[in-house]
Image (cartoon, helix red, strand yellow):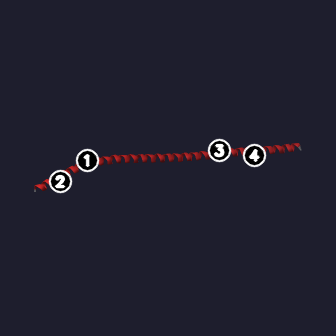
Amino acid sequence: MLDGQMEELRTIQEQQAEDKRRERAEMLAQVEENGKLEKAEFEQAELKREQVKKATGEMMEELERREQRLQAKKRGSRKRWRSGSMMRNVDKTRSYKLSKKHMQRRLSR
């Protein structure tokens, strides 16, 4: 009778040990799966971060190019204005001379 109880106790202990091993293996598998998911999420976040960084860099480059074009345009318009004002002064002088000659011709007639 004692042998039968001992055998039954050993069977129960073996079953409990097997359950613990199975539970441990499941837990390790779950930890591994969680690690893979976390790594995938991190990589996805890193990829998104890189895309945002790239887009921001491109936008900054475009803004810089625009600013350079604007500055060049301003410099160019200043030069045109200066040269235009000089031309206006020359035109005024010419028109003054022409009008003076014109007036002299009219008076001499």
Numbered label attached to residue 26: none
Q: Position of residue 32 (x, y in %)?
A: 65, 44
Side of 48 relative to 17 (left or right) = left
Give the farthest residue toward the front. 107
Numbered label attached to residue 99: 2
Q: Which numbered disc, 2 or 1, marks the residue closer to the eye? A: 2
Q: Say whether disc 2 or disc 1 marks the residue closer to the N-terminus.
A: 1
Disc 1 secondary structure class: helix
Q: Amino acid at mark 3?
A: Glu
Q: Say whether disc 4 or disc 1 marks the residue closer to the N-terminus.
A: 4
Q: Position of residue 85 (x, y in %)?
A: 27, 49
Q: Which numbered disc, 2 or 4, marks the residue closer to the eye? A: 2
Q: Quadrant of the C terminus?
A: bottom left
The answer to which of 51 and 40 lies nearer the viewer is 51
Q: Say whether disc 1 or disc 3 marks the residue closer to the N-terminus.
A: 3
Taking the spot 21% from the left edge, 49% from the top edge, the residue there is: 93
The answer to which of 32 and 2 lies nearer the viewer is 32
Numbered label attached to residue 86: 1
Q: Say whether disc 2 or disc 4 marks the residue closer to the N-terminus.
A: 4
Q: Residues within 10 Å of mark 4 (few under 14, many from 20)?
A: few
The answer to which of 46 and 60 lies nearer the viewer is 60
The residue at which mark 3 appears reads as 32
- What is the spatial separation of the Cα atoms under label 4 and label 1, in whole angstroms? 99 Å
Quarter location, residue 31: top right
Numbered label attached to residue 19: 4
Give the farthest residue toward the left. 109
Q: Amino acid at mark 4?
A: Asp
